[in-house]
């Protein structure tokens, strides 16, 4: 819940494009009882897919996903930095320092 609105957050990686690029999608419940996309936000660096590790207030903490990247195309899987965490601030719609 943010500013009286229900928010839906999905985390993972790009479905099309570079499988090493993590991303989150943020949607808001509208008056029509449907969720509407606010935005798709790419992680600041290509560390692979991400999972939501925690939510604290308006901050969403993302950690490496345990799902390996697909073996397709010319993509070379990255080796994620251990224990790397991204933090996204829902109030400002931007990445912030962990």
Image (cartoon, rainbow, N blue to C red):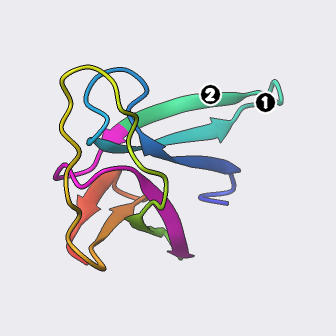
At x 63%, y 39%, the residue is 28
Please tell me which residue is depicted at 64% across the width and 47% down the height of the picture: 8
Q: Which quarter of the figure is the C terminus placed in?
A: bottom left
**For mark 2, what is the residue?**
36
Quarter where residue 19 is shown: top left
CA neighbours of label 2 inside 10 A, class few (<14), some (14 to 19), many (20+): some
- The numbered dot on residue 75 is none
Mark 1 or 2: in front is 2
> With respect to residue 2, does 16 lie above or below?
above
Q: CA distance from mark 1 to mark 2?
A: 10 Å
Q: Residue furthest front?
A: 71
From what the image shows, is residue 56 above or below residue 17?
Answer: below
Dot 1 or dot 2: first in sequence order is 1
At x 18% / y 23%, what residue is drawn?
74
Q: Nearer the viewer, residue 14 or 26?
A: 14
Residue 64: x and y in percent read 38, 64
- Does the magenta portion include 47? yes
* Image coords of residue 2 (percent x, y): 60, 59
Q: Which residue is at 24% across, 67% downward?
A: 96
Q: Is residue 2 left or right of residue 82?
A: right
Nearer to the camera, 72 or 52: 72
Left or right: 28, with 52 as reference point: right
Mark 1 crowdedness (10 Å alpha carbons): few <14, some 14-19, many ≥20: few
**Secondary-structure class at tag 2:** strand
Q: Which residue is mark 1?
A: 31
Give the quadrant of the N terminus: bottom right
Image: magenta residue range: 41-55
């Amino acid at each position: 819940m943010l500013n009286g609105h229900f928010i839906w957050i999905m985390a993972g990686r790009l479905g099309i494009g570079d499988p090493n690029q993590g991303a989150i999608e943020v949607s808001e419940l509208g008056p029509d009882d449907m969720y509407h996309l606010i935005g798709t936000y790419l992680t600041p660096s290509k560390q692979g897919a991400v999972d939501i590790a925690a939510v604290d207030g308006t901050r969403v903490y993302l950690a490496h996903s345990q799902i390996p990247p697909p073996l397709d195309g010319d993509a070379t899987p990255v080796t994620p930095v251990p224990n790397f965490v991204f933090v996204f601030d829902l109030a400002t719609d931007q990445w912030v320092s962990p």
